[in-house]
Image (cartoon, helix red, strand yellow):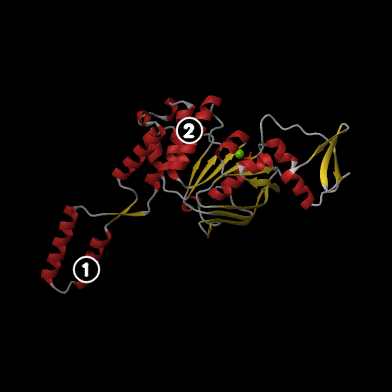
Amino acid sequence: MARVQLENVKKIYSGNVTAVHDFNLDIADKEFVVFVGPSGCGKSTTLRMVAGLEDISEGICKIDGEVVNDLQSKDRHISMVFQNYALYPHLTVFENMAFPLRLDKKEHVYPWSEEELQKINKKIEALKAKGGQEDKIAKLEASKEKGKVVKGYSQDEIFQKVIDAARVLGITQYLTRKPKALSGGQRQRVAIGRAMVKDCKVFLMDEPLSNLDAKLRNQMRAEIILLRKRINTTFIYVTHDQTEAMTLGDRIVCMRDGYIMQVGSPTQLFDMPDNLFVAQFIGAPMMNTFHTNLVEKGGKYHVEFFGAEFPITGEKGEMLKEKGVQTR
Ligand code: ADP
Ligand code: MG
């Protein structure tokens, strides 16, 4: 759960290739934002800068209010799913999913078992009998209050988390298999499962469905909607597929050549595209466009087209008027 802020973010690759120009975006906590645009427009680069997999050349990226520019990827509390799954071929599905949990060496606190508590109490008694051991006794009392501190997750917890994720994704029957014995869709589920088991603030997905056939892609899209409901965290999802963007995103960021062309809800982009690029990129089949003349009559705009006049009414007319659009 976290807000993600990108302020004047720029990416210059070696060879002076500017992949992302002055990117500004404020993503709310629990929002599902989709970056969409044609191949090469800088979607992955932007996502990878949030993930900490690419350096940020200029500008700042904040996660949960904290500037993360200099934080390593592992310290950013993100989970990421890639297009090519990136599973470890020599590990079983279970171990692939457990991997991020085994890597996590953060301190976890568990309640003491009855047995363990009794042992501590015995120690305290013994120290009291000895006398003059106040410091040690205080430490033990404090640890009784706090619970057992363990570095990393316990085996039980790893097992539980992996099983829970596998259940949600319907892959429990494959847990002992290696990735090569799975179909593309199943592999992608494992990759999503691996990202799910981690407690993360931001869930990043880079074209996770692009390698799947059309039917499976539709099915997985529905599953991602469910996944989102279940983990209810901030999502940034990258795709070149406008249908995917329209169906998944609370907000869509439409990009071209490293620039943001428009940010808005799916309906805003569809009904009120800011420019011709967005108008043609969003919507299937593609919108047809014509050169026409805009004329103004009695304070209202009309479009002249092959001798006929079509009034521009409502919101669109008001918008043109507000912007003082010139007629000819
Ligand atoms: P998208 O994900 O939208 O397809 P990318 O973010 O991968 O686009 O790439 C954006 C631009 O940056 C492209 O022009 C690409 O060629 C360039 N680019 C990506 N990675 C590198 C790199 N490591 N070195 C140089 N240029 C790169
Ligand atoms: Mg990409």
What amino acid type should be assigned to the residue bearing mark 2? Gln
Q: Position of residue 166 (x, y in %)?
A: 38, 35
Indicate left or right for 119 with 294 as reference: left
Whether residues under marks 1 and 2 lie with C-beta atoms below 8 angstroms apart, the answer is no
Within the image, what quadrant is residue 44 found in? top right
Q: Is residue 170 visible?
A: yes
Residue that lies at the very extreme toward the left in this rendered image: 129
Residue that lies at the very extreme toward the front in this rendered image: 298
Pointer 2 residue:
188
For this rendering, which residue is in front, 110 or 316?
Answer: 316
For this rendering, which residue is in front, 80 or 243?
Answer: 243
Crowding near pointer 1: few (<14 within 10 Å), some, many (20+)?
some
Q: Could you tell me which residue is drawn at 15 percent across and 67 percent down?
A: 127
Q: Could you tell me which residue is drawn at 47 percent across and 53 percent down?
A: 75
Up/down of 40 relative to 129, above or below: above
What amino acid type should be assigned to the residue bearing mark 1? Lys
Q: Could you tell me which residue is drawn at 60 percent across and 34 percent down?
A: 243
Q: Could you tell me which residue is drawn at 61 percent across and 41 percent down?
A: 266
Indicate left or right for 121 with 235 as reference: left
**Cα separation between marks 1 and 2:** 52 Å
Q: Is residue 88 visible?
A: no
Q: Secondary structure at mark 2?
A: helix
Pointer 1 residue:
136
Q: Position of residue 203 (x, y in %)?
A: 49, 45
Q: Secondary structure at mark 1?
A: helix
Disc nearer the start of the sequence (1/2): 1
Quarter that holds the C terminus: top right
Q: Quadrant of ligand 2?
A: top right
Q: Position of residue 68 (x, y in %)?
A: 53, 56
Crowding near pointer 2: few (<14 within 10 Å), some, many (20+)?
many
The dot on residue 297 is: none
For this rendering, which residue is in front, 51 or 136?
Answer: 51
